[in-house]
Amino acid sequence: MIEKVKAACRSTIELLGYDLVNVTYEEEFGTMELCIYIRAKSGEPISHKDCEKVSVAVDGIIEELDPSNGQSYNLSVSSLGIE
């Protein structure tokens, strides 16, 4: 499932000026969480607006893909933080 999400979303994320760094799908506080990690190609820090922009752009792609086979999950977009 993670590989499907990466393959489906990578080009959209790159067109927005970001690199797709990682995708995770884990249970957090009783809910499944699909998290996409990005970094800016420019090297600039990732802001909340950057995450929101990517989330809006990939939400429809992921919904159509249905990676969780109908199970509910939360989608989040984040950066890896300070390296």
Image (spheres, rainbow, N blue to C red):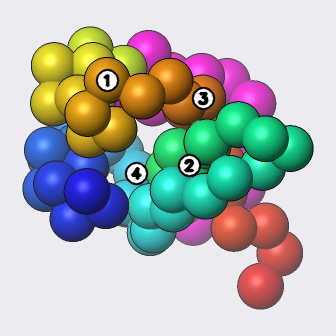
First in residue order: circle 4 vs circle 1: 4
The residue labelled by disc 1 is 70
Looking at the rendered image, the disc whose residue lies closer to the viewer, 3 or 1, is 1
Q: Is residue 53 left or right of residue 33?
A: left
Is 52 magenta? The answer is: yes
Q: CA distance from mark 2 to mark 4?
A: 15 Å
- Residue 48 x, y percent position in the rendering: 75, 30
Q: CA distance from mark 4 to mark 1?
A: 28 Å
Amino acid type indicated by mark 2: Cys
Specify the segment rendered in magenta: 43-58
First in residue order: circle 4 vs circle 3: 4
Asked if one can make out residue 16 in the rendered structure from this viewpoint, the answer is no
Q: Is residue 70 above or below residue 11?
A: above
Between 14 and 77, the residue placed more toward the observer is 77
Q: Residue at x 44, y 15 (%)?
A: 56
Q: Secondary structure at mark 1?
A: loop
Residue 18 marker: 4
Question: What main secondary structure does the magenta stretch of the protein show?
Answer: helix
The residue labelled by disc 2 is 35
Q: Quadrant of residue 73?
A: top right
Is 48 magenta? The answer is: yes
Looking at the rendered image, the disc whose residue lies closer to the viewer, 4 or 3, is 3
Looking at the rendered image, the disc whose residue lies closer to the viewer, 4 or 1, is 1
First in residue order: circle 2 vs circle 4: 4
